[in-house]
Amino acid sequence: MARADNTKEQLVLMCKECGDEQREYFQEILKKIGLKPNELIGKHIKKEFRGGERQREHMWVKITDMTEEEDLVGVLANNPCVVKNLQYGDLVTVKMNEIEDIDY
């Protein structure tokens, strides 16, 4: 297991290493550890983006800020292959319940 500096990071790492990629499971872990949006500023999160009926792509976003409603704001950290209406560096908004993974 990778080294984590605090309990929240340890729990996120444990969740990632268990191999369960279901968003609902990951969301339960986030709720249990009480991760707050402001704790994700500077981190990378993964979200599913849709560009059309059949266009789905899971991409990393570097979180740079948050809104008053506690949505996350960040820049797309991937070059999309499938979703053509986005490009690397685009500013995007992410809701806490859309997070699929966190790269501590």
Image: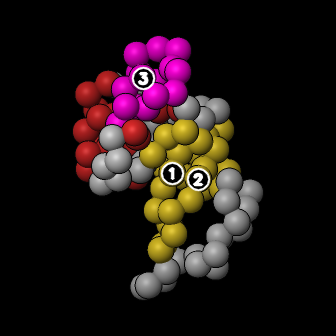
Kind of element beneath mark 1? strand
Give the residue number, with chain letter if any, for mark 3: 10
Residue 30 against residue 57 in the figure, above or below:
above
Whether the residues at callouts 3 and 2 have beta carbons within 8 Å, the answer is no
Q: Residues within 10 Å of mark 1 (few under 14, many from 20)?
A: some
Numbered badge on residue 46: 1
Label 3 or label 2, whichever lies nearer to me, is 3
Decide if residue 36 is in sight here.
no
Residue 53 against residue 94 in the figure, above or below:
below
The residues colored magenta run 1-15
- Residue type at mark 1: give it: Lys
Q: x and y percent of residue 9 in the render? A: 46, 24
Q: How many marks?
A: 3
Residue located 40% across and 39% down the image: 17
As for residue 2 lying within the magenta part, the answer is yes
Q: x and y percent of residue 85 in the render? A: 63, 76
Give the residue number, with chain letter if any, for mark 2: 60
Residue located 50% across and 36% down the image: 68
Answer with the quarter of the image where residue 82 lies: bottom right
